[in-house]
């Protein structure tokens, strides 16, 4: 007995085109500059946990307070005792607090870039009118700006306190300006190093550990070698050893050109000629970090 099979209509006969009302965007096109500014603003806010959960705000805000509290205490002591000068120079403050600064870089550099790598959102940025250089500049500028806020705020506290203590206005203004130049260089250098290290891995924990290791181990190793050189009366090599750590690089630049006292063993800072080398190395590291980030994100964005 024959079995009847239902006849299936071709797939083409079942397709339908529906007009669901999508319209093309006919508003203003804000372009690359607006996208770059938005990315910078978002990254800067994120560096202090603004616009994010309360948990994300705790560490950066705590580190900010830790940076400012010693300055406030120094100011209170100077005002109460009617001191003739501040206990710490403006150019020395960031060097003394370098451990806090390193911890801030270690916590915020991976937050800035590792999440984009982990969730593979970098190609989405580049699908819009934004290029690799725009992304890198926005991220680098945002972290450097956040670091500048972190390091310049206590200097402002010291400056205001010095004026309240009626210390010499010209001397304090000059010292405050020198301190701002110093922390601006420090912010650019540390931001570049932190982002280069953090961009290597999408894992935030690995990025934090790597940044801390690079900043602290290099400083510890350089300080140890400088102490050994001083013990062996090889003081001429102390400034050259300082070229191999970000913290001592900034210390050398400011002691050579900003009138700061050197924290090197024996107070042996670089000469003017050696100071030029320090400046070139700092600028070279910033430029090299920028170039590495450009090449890195060109590969990631493919």
Image (cartoon, rainbow, N blue to C red):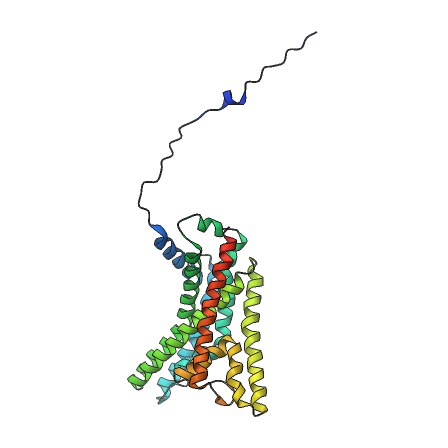
Q: Quadrant of residue 150?
A: bottom left
The residue furthest top is 1
Q: Looking at the picture, tell me which residue is in the foreground, 213 or 168.
A: 213
**Identity of the residue drawn at 35% across and 54% down:** 34
Instruction: Count the numbered circles shown.
Output: 0
Q: Position of residue 264 (x, y in %)?
A: 50, 85
Q: Is residue 248 left or right of residue 75?
A: right
Q: Is there any visible trace of residue 55 in the rendered image?
A: no
Q: Position of residue 159 (x, y in %)?
A: 34, 79
Q: Quadrant of residue 141?
A: bottom left
Q: Is residue 186 above or below residue 263?
A: above
**Identity of the residue drawn at 52% across and 76% down:** 245
The residue furthest right is 1
Q: Is there any visible trace of residue 184 in the rendered image?
A: yes
Q: Is residue 70 above or below residue 30?
A: below
Q: Position of residue 26 (x, y in %)?
A: 32, 40
The residue furthest bottom is 233
Q: Position of residue 74 (x, y in %)?
A: 41, 82
Q: Looking at the picture, tell me which residue is in the foreground, 48 or 125.
A: 125
Q: Quadrant of the N terminus?
A: top right
**Identity of the residue drawn at 49% across and 79% down:** 248
Q: Looking at the picture, tell me which residue is in the foreground, 169 or 13.
A: 13
């Amino acid at each position: 007995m024959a079995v009847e099979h239902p006849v299936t209509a071709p797939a083409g006969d079942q397709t339908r085109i529906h007009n669901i009302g999508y319209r093309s965007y006919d508003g203003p096109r804000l372009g690359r500059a607006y996208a770059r500014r938005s990315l910078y603003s978002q990254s800067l806010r994120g560096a202090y946990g603004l616009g994010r959960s309360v948990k994300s705000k705790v560490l950066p805000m705590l580190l900010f307070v830790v940076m400012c509290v010693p300055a406030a205490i120094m100011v209170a002591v100077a005002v109460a005792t009617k001191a003739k000068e501040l206990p710490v120079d403006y150019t020395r403050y960031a060097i003394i607090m370098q451990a806090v600064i390193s911890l801030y870089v270690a916590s915020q550099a991976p937050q800035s870039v590792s999440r984009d790598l982990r969730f593979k959102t970098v190609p989405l940025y580049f699908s819009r009118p934004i290029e690799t250089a725009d992304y890198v500049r926005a991220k680098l500028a945002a972290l450097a700006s956040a670091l500048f806020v972190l390091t310049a705020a206590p200097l402002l506290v010291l400056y205001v306190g010095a004026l309240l203590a009626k210390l010499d206005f010209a001397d304090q203004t000059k010292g405050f300006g020198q301190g701002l130049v110093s922390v601006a260089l420090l912010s650019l250098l540390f931001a570049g190093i932190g982002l280069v290290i953090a961009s290597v891995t999408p894992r935030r924990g690995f990025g934090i550990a790597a940044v801390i290791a690079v900043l602290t181990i290099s400083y510890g190793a350089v300080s140890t070698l400088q102490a050994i050189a001083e013990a062996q009366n090889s003081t001429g090599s102390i400034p050259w050893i300082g070229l191999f750590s970000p913290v001592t690089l900034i210390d050398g630049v400011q002691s050579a050109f900003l009138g700061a006292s050197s924290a090197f063993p024996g107070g042996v800072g670089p000469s003017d000629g050696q100071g030029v080398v320090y400046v070139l190395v700092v600028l070279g590291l910033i430029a090299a970090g920028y170039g590495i980030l450009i090449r890195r994100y060109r590969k990631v964005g493919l």
